Amino acid sequence: MGIRGVCLHYRWNEKLEDDVVYPEYDSLNDTFLIDSDGFSNANTLMRDSYGNLHNGYQGFDTWQGGYAVYNLDQKYLTFEGTIVTDASEGSEGSMQIQIYLDDQLAFSQANITKQTEQIPVSLDVTDVKVMKIVTQTEESHQWLYLVDDILLPHIHTPGEWEIKQEPTCTVKGIKVQYCTECKEECNTGEIEASGHKPGDWEVREEPTCTKEGTEVQICTVCKQECNTREIEALGHEPGEWEIKQEATCAEEGIRVKYCTRCKEECETEKIDVLEHTPGDEWETETEATCSEAGEEVKRCTVCGEICEKRSIPQKDHEESEEWETTIEATCSGEGEEVLRCKNCGLILDHRTIEKQDHEPGEAVETVAPTCTSSGTSVVYCKNCGEILETAPIPETGHTFGKWVTVRGSIWNSPMVKERICSVCGFRDSEKSYVWIWVKPVVIIAILGAVIIWILYTQMVKAGLEPKKENIKKLFEKKKANLKERLNRSDNDDEIKK
Ligand SMILES: [Zn+2]
Ligand SMILES: [Zn+2]
Ligand SMILES: [Zn+2]
Ligand SMILES: [Zn+2]
Ligand SMILES: [Zn+2]
Ligand SMILES: [Zn+2]
Ligand SMILES: [Zn+2]
């Protein structure tokens, strides 16, 4: 149900006064239209045939038998309105309109034309459920309008405020006013929630050093927690400094304060590193060499870190024990040897190596000797090939075969012998005159032998020892024998006789 703050009569009046109180009313445009035909309504301006402007209208096409049915729902007491024709050109036919309240004809007007004065309508609609407006014409196509309509409801006369529902601490209550006439509930209001009635603050959660606590207020009425607030964290209460980690010369130390309440570490501070404690001895870090200076350091006796440094002067070069041959001496050229530093290899000195003696190789026959001519042998240097020695090789002489007698013999005539060199084929020949003396010598020898043999046998026969001294005896014996024999033969002859 809308509440209009504008008076019907001053709706278009500039002199509208603010403090005028107007009754509540509704319009047909607010009311539920149940049914209609040949009908049009709007909340726009319409100008009637007298030139008056109206805000909103219910328009009925009379030619169509336009009608509308409204649901008043027994809410209203009076209905007021004005029937007008519009400003548009149209036929001059007459129209009629009837208004039914719950099917009972309550208003009827016929012969309405454009010249007809505005027709006011005022009806008692108490307890009316449905209002029906019906129009019609018999002549021509025209519209009829109902404007400035007002539905006035029953205006309650509110009694005292009565509490319908008590408010609680948190929930609003409801108060109502009943109409003194119709006893209906004609006004409803809220009663503010009473709000809690907080008791004393109570600690719900004790604060700690780092965490806030909570305290609450309980409503004395509903016993609900109605206020909560934080209790500030207490913050640590640091105790004395305690060394957590001793400082060394290598690392900072740490000292802390523990909270006397929660024992948590609540303050931390660094302790500066200590000074190094250098030792007394210098330590060689890098040996000096003959090419680079060395370094010696003093270290901290605690952490071993180097606290002091100094260089060790570069060393002198140190000669190697042995010379190193860089160029070998040969029989054709001098060599070279150097003396290096034992440590860095730098050449400190150098000297030449005397040329070497030639080294004779095996004698090589360059010209071969023959049977009759000498050859040559040469000794070369093994290394450079130089000729060191040349020597003749004596001729070999012929290599003869056996002597072969080619003519004559030892017995007679001169004998010719020949031999041939197997190498060069040279023939060597020789004449022998042996034959001149061989024969007589042989004959004499044989004779002598025969004589000796005879002598021998005769001596044996004669019983003589075969000796030279006995040769004379033998001959004497023979001589004697012969004489005897001769004697005997004489005797024999005599005997025979
Ligand atoms: Zn009432
Ligand atoms: Zn409460
Ligand atoms: Zn603490
Ligand atoms: Zn140190
Ligand atoms: Zn060196
Ligand atoms: Zn040589
Ligand atoms: Zn020869």
Image (cartoon, helix red, strand yellow):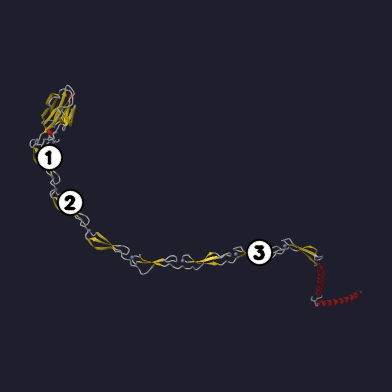
Residue 74 visible in the picture: no
Q: Are marks 3 and 2 in contact (CB under 8 Å)?
A: no
> According to the image, label 3 marks what residue?
377
Location of residue 46 in the rendering, given as x and y in whole percent from the top left corner: 17, 30
Q: Which mark is residue 228?
A: 2
Comparing 367 with 114, the one in front is 114
Quadrant of the snapshot with the C terminus:
bottom right
Side (left or right) of 36 relative to 327: left
Mark 3 and mark 1: span between their CA atoms? Answer: 160 Å
Q: Earlier in the sequence, mark 1 or mark 2?
A: 1
Q: Are marks 3 and 1 in contact (CB under 8 Å)?
A: no
* Kind of element beneath mark 2: strand
Side (left or right) of 289 relative to 33: right
Location of residue 220 in the rendering, given as x and y in whole percent from the top left corner: 13, 50
> According to the image, label 1 marks what residue?
188
Q: Residue furthest right?
A: 497
How dense is the environment of label 2, judged by Cα within 10 Å: few (below 14), some, or many (20 and up)? Answer: some
How dense is the environment of label 1, judged by Cα within 10 Å: few (below 14), some, or many (20 and up)? Answer: some
Q: Amino acid at mark 1?
A: Thr
